[in-house]
């Protein structure tokens, strides 16, 4: 994800929630706090082991329902995300699990959806 997209999203979020004018000290402080929370905060709702277990189970369900290609792609992309090196400015490891959790929560009956 591009840094500019994240910055724009955070600024829009701060403005829409606080209604503070962009450029004021309070606004800048809120933006800085949100960035810090996103970068360093650990949001206790996501268990790394539980998320990986759910994805493994979902891949197994794809296989049971003769959807081997979907299972393979799911495993490939989850593995690819988790193996990406941690570099300065990259998404923190726990945030990767939060993203995977978000995808699971947004999915609606993944076995019966056409992913083309």
Image (tube, helix red, strand yellow):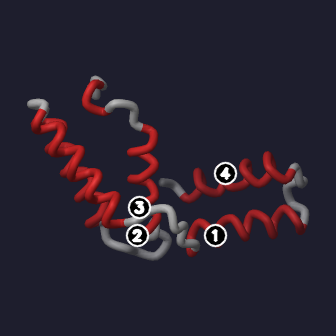
Look at the numbered disc 2 and give the secondary structure of its residue. helix
Disc 1: which residue: 37
Around disc 1, counting alpha carbons within 10 Å, would you say few (fewer than 14), some (14 to 19), or many (20 or more)? Answer: few
Disc 3 from disc 2: Cα separation: 5 Å
> How many numbered marks, from 0 up?
4
In depth, the one of 25 and 94 nearer the eye is 94
The residue to which callout 3 is attached is 96
Position of residue 46 relative to residue 13, above or below, is: below
**Which label was assigned to residue 93?**
2
Q: Are marks 3 and 2 in contact (CB under 8 Å)?
A: yes
| Residue that appears at 64% across and 72% down | 36
Q: Which residue is mark 4?
A: 8
Circle 4 or circle 1, nearest the eye: 1
Q: Is residue 4 above or below residue 91?
A: above
Q: Picture coordinates of residue 5 (x, y %)?
A: 58, 51
Q: Which callout, 1 or 2, points at the residue further toward the start of the chain?
A: 1
User: Residue, x 77% and y 54% (percent of image)?
Assistant: 14
Badge 3 density bin: few <14, some 14–19, many ≥20, Cα 10 Å: some
Label 2: few (<14), some (14–19) or many (≥20) C-alpha neighbours in 10 Å: some
């Amino acid at each position: 994800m591009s840094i500019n997209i994240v910055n724009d999203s955070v600024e829009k979020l701060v403005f829409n929630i606080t209604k503070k004018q962009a450029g004021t000290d309070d606004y800048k402080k809120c933006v800085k706090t949100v960035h810090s929370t996103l970068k360093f905060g650990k949001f206790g709702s996501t268990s790394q082991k539980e998320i990986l277990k759910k994805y493994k189970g979902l891949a197994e369900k794809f296989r049971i329902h003769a959807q081997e290609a979907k299972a393979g792609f799911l495993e490939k992309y989850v593995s690819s995300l988790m193996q990406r090196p941690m570099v300065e400015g990259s998404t923190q490891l726990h945030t990767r699990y939060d993203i995977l959790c978000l995808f699971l929560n947004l999915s609606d009956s993944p076995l019966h959806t056409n992913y083309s």
